[in-house]
């Protein structure tokens, strides 16, 4: 009997152990699945990368969000450019001819990336007009924050977006630590405190508050010299994407509005000291000539380029800009390279014809016929900068 009990005990013990292990493993897997399910549901609720349709765009990572927004907003007008129009061009301005307006400008972008975004918008939205804002700095080396740019995410005229990139977006948004972290960031950030607005532009109030909290406007201006890139601008590689922008505009019957964005004269002095005034002005000459040549080949006709440099506004001293802001106004410039929506509104009034007779000194229409006269005017204005 004792031997039989021992046998039962010996044979019974190993039978129970797998049952306990299986229950533990099953509980663990269920808990993990529940956690992942709740995390995915939370990410879907917050929708930090704007992958899902939503009335409230977050734009935590704008190079991801804007690719999806273009197809949902279906803008009639798009803004293409660098961080300058991203911050300084108001999408709600009354001068726009074809709303809604989507701001497709990005910090640290190049003309090659601008071309890809423009073609994407032309492919997924009924565009009628594009404000294409080009500046000398857009030819500089890539910014570090450009790592989120993925051409496969964007549509082209000859194909839609790559499904592998869309699938990667879904996985990142709803099944990654990056997505969960961004979702918690959205939960803790009220709409007034977000870095970006739903129409794609940068939140100007948040930007200005950060400047004031870090020493104010004077410090912001003084940081320009230390942050100025010393690497010489490489222009040649940017011209083919620019030609493609012209061809895409012609193919989709989109009216391009070409704008050379304004810098403060102090920044032009740094560019001229680094690259030479011949190359700085040569960039403008090449820009106009190449675009006009491609436009002629595509049947777009004579193109106008709005030039906002070398004016009384861009020659204002720091003291005058700070004094103007101290009177309760939005600053005209936040530092030497970024203008505010006060300046952006003046630009739109001139470019889009809402107030074509206003601020005549600010904004010069340039065509191929008037190009050399304009370059001579700028040479006279900028030649003394390096001697001061």
Image (spheres, grey):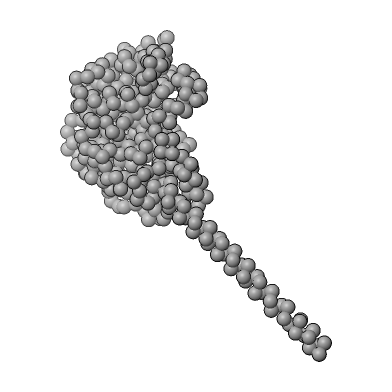
Quadrant location of the C terminus in the rendered image: top left
Residue sitting at the far top? 388
| Relative height, residue 364 to residue 64 (above, below) | above
Residue sitting at the far right? 2
Residue 165, percent from left and from top? 40, 52
- Of residues 296 and 192, the one nearer the viewer is 192
- Report how many numbered discs are placed on residues in the image: 0
| Relative height, residue 8 to residue 256 (above, below) | below
Q: Residue at x 26, y 42 (%)?
A: 75
Quadrant location of the N terminus in the rendered image: bottom right
| Relative height, residue 297 to residue 226 (above, below) | below
Residue 366, percent from left and from top? 23, 23
Q: Is residue 309 visible?
A: yes
- Of residues 263 and 94, the one nearer the viewer is 94
Q: Residue at x 48, y 49 (%)?
A: 179
Q: Residue at x 31, y 14 (%)?
A: 312
Q: Residue at x 37, y 53 (%)?
A: 162
Residue 368, percent from left and from top? 22, 25
Horizontal side of residue 208 vs 16, given as left or right: left
Residue 69, percent from left and from top? 34, 45
- Of residues 302 and 22, the one nearer the viewer is 22
Question: Residue 259 appears in which quarter of the rendering?
Answer: top left
């Amino acid at each position: 009997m004792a031997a039989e009990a021992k046998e039962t005990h010996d044979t019974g013990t190993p039978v129970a152990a797998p049952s306990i292990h299986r229950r533990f493993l099953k509980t663990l897997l269920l808990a993990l699945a529940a956690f992942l399910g709740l995390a995915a549901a939370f990410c879907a609720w917050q929708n930090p990368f704007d992958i899902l349709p939503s009335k409230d765009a977050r734009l935590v990572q704008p190079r991801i969000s804007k690719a999806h927004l273009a197809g949902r907003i279906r803008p009639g007008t798009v803004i293409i450019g660098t961080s300058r129009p991203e911050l300084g061009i108001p999408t709600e301005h009354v001068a726009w001819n074809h709303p809604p307006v989507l701001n497709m400008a990005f910090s640290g972008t190049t003309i090659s990336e601008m071309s890809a975004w423009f073609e994407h918008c032309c492919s997924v939205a009924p565009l009628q007009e594009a404000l294409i804002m080009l500046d000398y700095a857009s030819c500089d080396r890539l910014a570090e924050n450009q790592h989120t740019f993925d051409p496969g995410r964007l549509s082209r005229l000859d194909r839609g977006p790559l499904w592998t990139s869309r699938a990667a977006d879904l996985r990142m948004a709803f099944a990654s630590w990056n997505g969960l972290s961004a979702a918690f960031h959205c939960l803790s950030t009220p709409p007034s405190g977000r870095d970006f607005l739903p129409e794609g532009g940068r939140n100007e109030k948040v930007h200005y508050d950060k400047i004031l909290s870090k020493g104010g406007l004077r410090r912001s201006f003084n940081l320009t010299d230390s942050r100025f890139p010393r690497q010489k601008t490489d222009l040649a590689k940017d011209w083919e994407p620019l030609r493609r922008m012209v061809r895409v505009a012609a193919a989709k019957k989109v009216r391009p509005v070409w704008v050379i964005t304004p810098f403060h004269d102090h920044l032009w002095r740094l560019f001229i000291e680094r690259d030479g005034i011949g190359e700085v002005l040569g960039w403008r000459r090449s820009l106009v000539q190449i675009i006009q040549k491609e436009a002629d080949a595509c049947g777009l006709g004579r193109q106008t380029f709005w030039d906002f440099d070398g004016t009384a506004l861009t020659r204002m001293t720091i003291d005058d800009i700070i004094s103007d802001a101290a009177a309760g106004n939005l600053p005209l410039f936040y530092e030497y390279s970024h203008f505010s929506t006060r300046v952006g509104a003046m630009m739109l009034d001139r470019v889009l014809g809402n107030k074509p007779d206003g601020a005549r000194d600010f904004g010069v229409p340039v065509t191929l016929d008037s190009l050399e006269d304009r370059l001579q005017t700028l040479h006279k204005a900028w030649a003394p900068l390096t001697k001061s």
